[in-house]
Image (cartoon, rainbow, N blue to C red):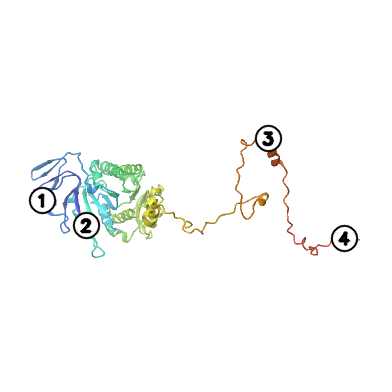
Amino acid sequence: MELRCVQSPTLSGVPRNALSGIPYSCCRTIVSCPLDKRISSGATRFMYSDSRVRVKGTAIEKSKANYIVSSSDVGPKDDNLVFVAGATGKVGSRTVRELLKLGFKVRAGVRSVQRAASLVESVKNLKVENEGETQYVDMLELVECDLERADQISTALGNSSTVVCCIGASEKEILDTTGPYRIDYKATENLIGAATSAKVSHFILVTSLGTNKVGFPAAILNLFWGVLIWKRKAEEALLASGIPYTIVRPGGMERPTDSFKETHNITLSTEDTLFGGLVSNLQVAELLAFMAKNRSLSYCKVVEVVAETTAPLLPFEDLLNKIPSNRELSPPKSSEKIAAVSESTPELAKATSAGIPQSPYVCYEDLKPPTSPTPTTGSKLSNFTNNNVPAATPSPSPTEVDSSERPEILREATAPKEPKSTQPSSPYIKYHDLKPPSSPSPSAPI
């Protein structure tokens, strides 16, 4: 696991020779932790400044806007890499662990490395099914990033192909009147803009029930400084971005614990259907991980999630198939199809590039494809001798015909056609003695 910082850090209490030769550029590896020391005691001595890097009093000037992307972070998208925003939250931390269980590599976006210590410990406690496999903690990468600063996000995303956004205003900071606006809307909008510029393959956004409703209970929740209004603004920003998306609107997640799934089965509904309900953080995290793994099933869908005791236990695939997509899944381009065929059949690709004909009739001279006979009129049957067809002579157009020949052409065209000889099909004509049975004619009464 690597720790990455997207801000310009101030490092205190770190020996100078420990960091000598390390380039101080944005989002480059600052500390590579061994397996037994993911978050060492020295990590608690990290303090961050906005404009310069300091090591034991030595100042290295650094501009605020000068963010350099490491060459290791630039490249094609990695379909197995997921960026999780809000990775230290209740839903985000569980989503990170569920993604790792499915085999994803995860870039966990956090505001502070110190706050991610519990996340790393929980990942270390995950047991690998088979011995010798890569430890889950080796597939986790912490990226320190402030989503309220839009110039940091593109570097933090790296080459992630999927983005999962689980951020939200803290319920503990109830007196912060700007929290829902800054976090639920502006920070999410910044992340959507960076993901659009980076051309990610899929964006999964977690909001809440009632974001597009008025009245109870949305009115009560909006007393928390209009939180549902700003969440709806974030949904609209994602819908307008044009990138493939999935919007998840869970019910209340404050009271249910992780054992909630043992007695309540998850259900999915279309947008603007449900008015209330409960669901656990773990159930939502499992759903998000499944959506990241099966993006075609969740393509451009808005789902509302609750858990009920009376709901049947169904796999996520069946639940998602019932939710209609708001956008048709675009088929691959013709060039992509050709590339896919070439990769699957390399011999065919070599033969095509070498110009080798693909028809079997070329290899066998006597083998010819079947042809249909050309229909001919009865008046021209005499022209066929010894199965040789004379070469067809093109008929002159009306403009090329001499004026003296036009009356003859007209006469031929208007001449009455000879009636076709019809051969009787009745068997009674060939056999004179054979007559059809006849009914006796009725005679008048005497």
Q: Residue at x 10, y 41 (%)?
A: 59
Residue 341 occupies which quadrant of the picture? bottom left
From the image, state whether disc 3 or disc 2 is nearer to you.
Answer: 3
Find residue 443 and name its label. Answer: 4
Are dots 3 and 2 in contact, CB under 8 Å? no
Q: Which residue is mark 3?
A: 404
**Element class at badge 3:** loop
Q: Which residue is mark 2?
A: 138
* Rendering coords of residue 422 (x, y %): 73, 54
Front residue of 137/206: it is 137
* Rendering coords of residue 26 (x, y %): 19, 44
Upstream in sequence: badge 1 or badge 4: 1
**Element class at badge 4:** loop
User: Amino acid under label 2?
Assistant: Asp
Front residue of 349/231: it is 349
Q: Residue at x 22, y 57 (%)?
A: 138
Q: CA distance from mark 2 to mark 1?
A: 23 Å
**Element class at badge 1:** helix
Find residue 18 and name its label. Answer: 1
